[in-house]
Image: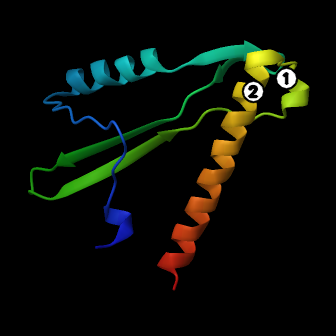
Amino acid sequence: NDVRETFSAVGAKTTLLDSPYALARFARSVEATRTQKSHLLNDRSSRSHCLVKISAKGADGKSNSLLFVDLAGSERVSRTGAVGDAKQEAQAINGSLSALGRVVKALGEAGNG
């Protein structure tokens, strides 16, 4: 099984979208669930990660997928002015992004080997 064709996530949901209107409504609901906070560098800094995979079947019967990834913002904590819980949150986000980077690198190396 090719790793590039496999996608799964804990807590993933499947939603049938049967029209462009339904897709737009879904996109708005995803946007509404994002967590964001302001700090010295950014008024709307994303504080959550989100993965959305959209699969569609064309009139020719072929299936295609798009994977949209919205990652929480990575900022230098010292420049944001974050303290207390916000500082800990920023450090956790930066740690998770570093871990994700290592995973992506490993997958890329596995695909070239």
Res 23 → quadrant: top left
Observer-side mark, 2 or 1, equals 2
Q: Residue at x 66, y 15 (%)?
A: 37
**Which tag, 2 or 1, sits closer to the chain's start?**
1
Where residue 22 appears, as percent x and y from the top left, is 21, 22
Residue 80, compared with residue 105, is above or below; it is above
Q: Residue at x 18, y 56 (%)?
A: 63
Labelled disc at residue 80: 1
Labelled disc at residue 88: 2
Res 33 → quadrant: top left
Give the residue at the far right of this rendering: 78
Give the residue at the far bottom of this rendering: 113
The residue lying toward the viewer, choosing from 6 and 27, is 6
Q: Secondary structure at mark 1?
A: helix
Res 96 → quadrant: top right
Residue 60, compared with residue 85, is above or below; it is below
Where residue 71 appears, as percent x and y from the top left, is 57, 37
**Which kind of residue does numbered mark 2 sit on?**
Gln
**Left or right: residue 108 compared with residue 94:** left
Where residue 26 appears, as percent x and y from the top left, is 30, 23
Tell me whether the residue at label 2 lies in contact with that at label 1, contact meaning CB atoms closer than 8 angstroms. Answer: no
Q: Residue at x 59, y 52 (%)?
A: 100
Pointer 2: residues within 10 angstroms few (<14), some, or many (20+)?
A: few
Residue 22, compared with residue 102, is above or below; it is above
Where residue 51 appears, as percent x and y from the top left, is 43, 39
Q: Quadrant of the N terminus?
A: bottom left
Colour treatment of the image: rainbow
**Total number of numbered labels?**
2
Q: Residue at x 15, y 32 (%)?
A: 16
**Which kind of residue does numbered mark 1 sit on?**
Thr
Pointer 1: residues within 10 angstroms few (<14), some, or many (20+)?
A: some
- Report the Cα–Cα distance between label 2 and label 1: 12 Å
